[in-house]
Amino acid sequence: MCAGNAADVPNIAAESLVGNWEHDYALPTDEQQTPPETVPPLSSSGHLSHLPSQVTHLRFVAVDRCRSFIDTNRKVKLNTGLQSKAVFCRLFGLLKVRAQRMRYWYGIKRHARKTRTRSYRRTPKKSGPARSLTCKDEFALTLMKLRLGLTNDFLANIFGVSAGTCSAILNTWIKLLARKLKCLIVWPSKEQTRMFMPHSLRVKYPNLRCTLDCSETFIYRPRDLKLQSATWSEYKHHNTLKYLVAIAPDGLISFISKAWGGRTTDRYIVQHSGILDLIEPYDLVLADRGFTIREDLLFRHADLEIPPPSSGLTQMSRMNVLKTKKVANTRIHVERAINRIKWFKILSGVLHVSLIPLFDDILVVCAALCNLLGPLVK
């Protein structure tokens, strides 16, 4: 009995493994059923001689890892801030030639050792190590950083690179975008301003040249006590970076200043940002009550329009109420333009201290990308 049962065990096991499968996905595949004698031996060099060349070729195959983030217009606008997929492709086409030749920026100390200047006519390709991503992936990664405000570690996991490589890509591409897109922030001439001025503003302010306002971006508290004091904003009760934004009457962002500490006053930024050099005689500048720059504009034979002061103790006169309403209805457009800029989460969130050296370039890129959108005032 024992011998008979022992002899029947292999047959039962074989039957349970082969003939009694309850699910199709558990069936062995054809490759698993291949007899061992049909597999070529490892000693045959004819089957393995071509593998090194194929492995080397696969390392440099261009695979767009950003395809799932930009395959529709909705995803492009959500992830990159651009209006459509066509705008993304056209903008990348303008930057592709220059981007293929640029080297990654790893810091001042590392690049200071290399004093040799490159000749792009002789070396049209990028020098140094091979790219981990395609130029299109790097472009999408940079726009996603600006639009969504994602961390470098999260972006590195999405695109399959290290955090150091992601940081080098961002530092390089932000500099490139700021240099190439700066031309989109244009200060229009007086004739162009009058030509494209909306009809609603042409009646109220025929000499209107620009509308000014300041905005702030939160930053993490620096360790240095002097920097803490310089960036502290009493208005926001936080450490911030402050910058000036000017728009044309049609809503185009015509000027954006460099960043200052949060404790800097509006008048000081206007005086040292360079916008006063662009004002011409008989121009009208619209601003808020905090911009006490009337004397600075009088030196340039220009005028300032701000809401009338309010003491808060007595009721405003009917004339002052109507003037306040008139200025507020026109000045609201600069706040809408700032909201467009703040749609890029890197400016509306809390900025890391390591990105402060790139903040001026980030402002230029975000403002230039906003000018690619549709008109703000019709």
Image: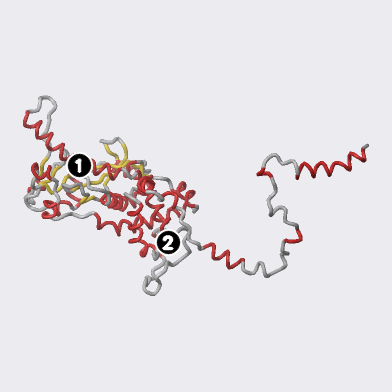
Identity of the residue drawn at 77% across and 41% down: 16
Q: Is residue 18 left or right of residue 159?
A: right
* x then y, percent, for residue 322: 9, 32
* x then y, percent, for residue 319: 6, 31
Tell me the amino acid under the disc marked 2: Arg
Q: Residues within 10 Å of mark 2 (few under 14, many from 20)?
A: few
Query: The C terminus lies in which quarter of the figure?
Result: top left
Q: Nearer the viewer, mark 1 or mark 2?
A: 1
Measured in 3D between alpha carbons, the distance from the residue under mark 1 to the one under mark 2, in whole angstroms, is: 45 Å
- Contact? badges 1 and 2 (CB < 8 Å): no
Tell me if residue 30 comes above or below residue 26 in the rendering. below
Q: Is residue 225 left or right of residue 42?
A: left
Tell me if residue 156 comes above or below residue 118 in the rendering. above
Identity of the residue drawn at 27% across and 38% down: 233
Q: Is residue 200 left or right of residue 103?
A: left
Provide the secondary structure element on which disc 2 rests: helix
Q: How many marks?
A: 2
Query: Which sits in the foreground, 197 or 22?
Result: 22
Query: Which sits in the foreground, 6 or 286?
Result: 6
* x then y, percent, for residue 52: 60, 67
Identity of the residue drawn at 30% across and 41% down: 240
Tell me if residue 307 comes above or below residue 152 in the rendering. above
Provide the secondary structure element on which disc 1 rests: helix
Which residue is the site of mark 2?
Answer: 110
Identity of the residue drawn at 33% across and 45% down: 344
Mark 1 vs 2, N-terminal side: 2
Q: Is residue 240 left or right of residue 311?
A: right
Query: Which sits in the foreground, 132 or 5?
Result: 5
* x then y, percent, for residue 122: 39, 74
Tell me the amino acid under the disc marked 1: His
Query: The N terminus lies in which quarter of the figure?
Result: top right
Which residue is the site of mark 1?
Answer: 333
